[in-house]
Amino acid sequence: MQAMAHNPTRGCEILKQEFSTLLGDEPMARHTSFKVGGAADLFATPTSRDELIRIVTRARALGVPVSPMGSGTNILVRDKGIRGLVLSMKKINARPTITRISGTESLVTVSSGVILAALARFAMDHGLAGFGFAAGIPGTVGGAVMMNAGTALGTISDSLVSLEILTLDGEVKTVERSDLGFSHREISFNGFGPEVLVLGADFLLAPGDRSAMQASWAAHLEKRRASQPGSAASAGCFFKNPDKERPAGLLIDKAGLKGRRCGNAMVSEAHANFIVNLGGATASDILALKRLVENEVKNQFNVDLKPEVKIDGE
Ligand SMILES: Cc1cc2nc3c(=O)[nH]c(=O)nc-3n(C[C@H](O)[C@H](O)[C@H](O)COP(=O)(O)OP(=O)(O)OC[C@H]3O[C@@H](n4cnc5c(N)ncnc54)[C@H](O)[C@@H]3O)c2cc1C
């Protein structure tokens, strides 16, 4: 959500004076799973919707650009950091609520900062199916919605009914599913700019067998543990799959790039679509490796890989 800046530097100074909870020059390496990235001019983790709306409205009035984030598990921040205010939604995380719609369907209302896996567990505990796809996906519900996160089992958009958003004008609105578009790791908002802040979401879920769902969840977690680089710092799959027949990881593997390094960034040996930070990598290392992978895959297979990871900052 980038508001046009009149004098963003002065705007940041005023904002920091007005909101004592804002952090100045906050290294984004502390807030992203890649563990790289320079400082954000300002960083906020509001703990209530009121506080969030006050900060965003004031930032906009002062011409300070606002960049929302969830848990930072799909973001690569460049080494010179992010100008303006980074707003973490992690603490906008009220407990989900369930409204029975009929004997067969329930509406689950969730705040954006709730962790996706926690929502999936909540749904399972209440005998509701629909989040089995999320086993092993880190991050918040808001981040998952903005990324249309998913696995071979499904995506978050499958059961999404509506979103509550904060627009660039500081208005809270409900966006129905019919005004949303979904594609591979993408969402679009018809009639709204792309720059909105997701406050919450409603999902329509059907009943499921609790123990079958729990067993399936555990099996999928185990499968991922066996095929992914475990605790290494990364942002998950770096590139989008060009199509179902040719997943990016397969192309990168076939190009012989597993283990290839730029500085301390490496194409994972466990999963070729993961770029991992071996420790002390810079965003420049990761971006150099990204270019190398793109060039090799283009040369060998004439395929243009596109990043799934959101690249932000300067
Ligand atoms: C080990 C690992 C495994 C992964 N596996 C998968 C997988 O299987 N499938 C998959 O789809 N992804 C996967 N990911 C990627 C990532 O976890 C998902 O994209 C996740 O949904 C991102 O959530 P987040 O809260 O971390 O979002 P962030 O990374 O913080 O943000 C992602 C994007 O969403 C925007 N955003 C976040 N919250 C909001 C909000 N409230 N309002 C407006 N914009 C917002 C940000 O500006 C950014 O552009 C994996 C990542 C890791 C590290």
Image: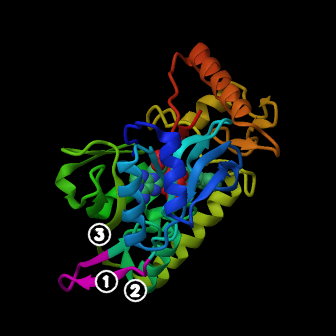
Instruction: Give the color scheme: rainbow, by chain, secondary structure or one colour.
Output: rainbow
Q: Nearer the viewer, residue 148 or 77?
A: 77
Whether 78 is drawn above or below 95: the answer is above
Image coords of residue 217 (percent x, y): 53, 71
Q: Is residue 105 magenta?
A: yes
Image coords of residue 184 (percent x, y): 39, 42
Looking at marks 1 and 2 on the same chain, the residue that comes earlier in the sequence is marked by 1
- Real-space Cα distance between discs 1 and 2? 9 Å
Identify the mark at residue 202; answer none if there is no mark. Answer: 3
Identify the mark at residue 126; answer none if there is no mark. Answer: 2
Looking at this rendering, what residue extends furthest in the top direction?
Answer: 299
The answer to whether the residue labelled 1 contacts the one labelled 2, judged by CB atoms less than 8 Å apart, is: yes
Circle 1 or circle 2, nearest the eye: 1
At x 69%, y 25%, the residue is 288
Q: Which residue is mark 1?
A: 98
Q: In the picture, residue 142 is in which quadrant?
A: bottom left
